[in-house]
Amino acid sequence: MSLLRNFGKVITACKKEYKKKRFGEFELMEGYSEGSLLCAGDNEDLMKYLLQKRDMAGKIQQIYIDPPFFSKATYDATVKVTNADGDEIKIKKRAYEDIWEEGMEEYLKMMGVRLMLMKDLLADTGTIWVHLDWHGVYYVKVLMDEIFGEKNFVNEIVWTYKSGGSSKSHFARKHDSILVYAKSKKYYLDIPKEKSYNRDFKPYRFKGVSEYQDEIGWYTLVNMKDVWSIDMVGRTSKERTGYATQKPEALIERILTAGSKEGDLVADFFCGSATLAAVAERTGRRWICSDNSDVAIHSAKARLENKQLSML
Ligand SMILES: C[S@@+](CC[C@H](N)C(=O)[O-])C[C@H]1O[C@@H](n2cnc3c(N)ncnc32)[C@H](O)[C@@H]1O
C-alpha cells in the first residue's frame, strides 16, 4: 500500500519542518490563573516559541490533544451573541475544517511535526494522550511508535458513549481511542480503582480482599481497565458550550487526575472550547491551551470568563 511505502518520506518531511527554527505570529493571553496561557494561533508556532523563547523543554507534565480526526468533515459552533437591539441570539459559525486535499500523508505530516515538538515539551515523568477515532488512530499509532518509541506506549484507552444515529451498513460506531505514550520509563500514572462485580450473588471472601455491596451486588475494587464508559455532553448539559466536538469534563478530569498532580503544568494544543483548561482550573493545575480557530478561541474565552459572548 502506497502510504506504508511512503511512511519514511512522511517522517523525513516532519523532521525537516520540526528543525526549522522560524515561527509565525500568534496572540498570547495570560492571566486566567497564575502560570496559565491561552494562545490564538497555530500550535506549531506556539510550541516553537515555548521551546526557543520560554525555555520550556521538558516542563509540561501532561499533554492531552483532541486534534482533527481525518473525518473529511467541517464543524460548526453555536454561539450566543448580542444583536444591535441588545437581544441575545444564537448563531451558527464555521469553527474548523477537517479536510485534507492530499489525503492521509498530509494529515500525518501535520500531526508528526507537532508530536515531535510536544515530545520536546514533555517532562521526563510526563505522558501524552492523543484522542482520535477509527479514521486515523492506527496510522497515528505507527507515527507515535516512531516518534516516542514503541517501548513507551502505555495504553489505548477506549472511550465509549451513547449518542444518536446508527447505520444499516455497519455496527453503530460509538467509541473513540485515546493513545497514551510516556516520555520515558520514569512516567507518573495514578491509576484509580473501579468496582468489579462478582459474578455470583454471595461474596467470595478472598483472604485479604475487601468486598463491598451496593444495589447491583457484591464487588471488589480493582485497578481501572482501559475501556471507559462516560456520557457525552448532553444537549441540556450545563457544561455545553455549543462547540461541535466538545468533550465531556468527566473524561478530561479522569485523564488529568491520572497523569498529573495539583500544581503541575498540563497542555492541550488543539483546545477547541477549552475543556482541558476548565478542568485544570477546577482541579488546581496550570495549563497551556491553543487553537487556530477564532470561533474556538471565543468559545474558550467565554467559558473561562464564565460569560456569554457579546461580539464575534
Ligand atoms: C476536536 S476539536 C477540539 C475540541 C475540544 N477538545 C473541546 O472539548 O472543545 C479540534 C480543534 O483543533 C483545532 N486545530 C486544528 N488545527 C490546529 C492547529 N494547527 N493549531 C491549533 N489548533 C488547531 C481546531 O480549530 C479545533 O478547534
Image: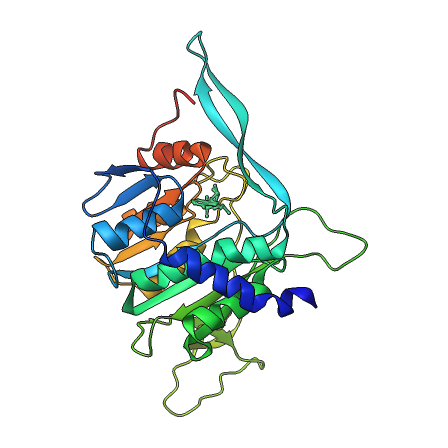
Drawn side of residue 107 relative to residue 209, left or right: right
Q: Residue at x 50, y 35 (%)?
A: 242
Image mark count:
0
117 up-or-down from 249: above or below: below
The answer to whether residue 246 is seen in the rendering is yes
Drawn side of residue 92 relative to residue 270, left or right: right
Measured as percent of width and height from the top left, residue 215 is found at 51, 66
Q: How is the image coloured?
A: rainbow
Say which quarter of the image contains residue 123: bottom left
**273 or 14: which is nearer to us?**
14
Say which quarter of the image contains residue 7: bottom right
235 up-or-down from 119: above or below: above
**288 or 18: which is nearer to us?**
18
Measured as percent of width and height from the top left, residue 303 is found at 37, 36
- Which quadrant of the rendered structure holds the N terminus? bottom right
Say which quarter of the image contains residue 140: bottom right
Measured as percent of width and height from the top left, residue 184 is found at 33, 75
Q: Residue at x 34, y 45 (%)?
A: 23
Drawn side of residue 28 relative to residue 296, left or right: left
- Which quadrant of the rendered structure holds the C terminus? top left
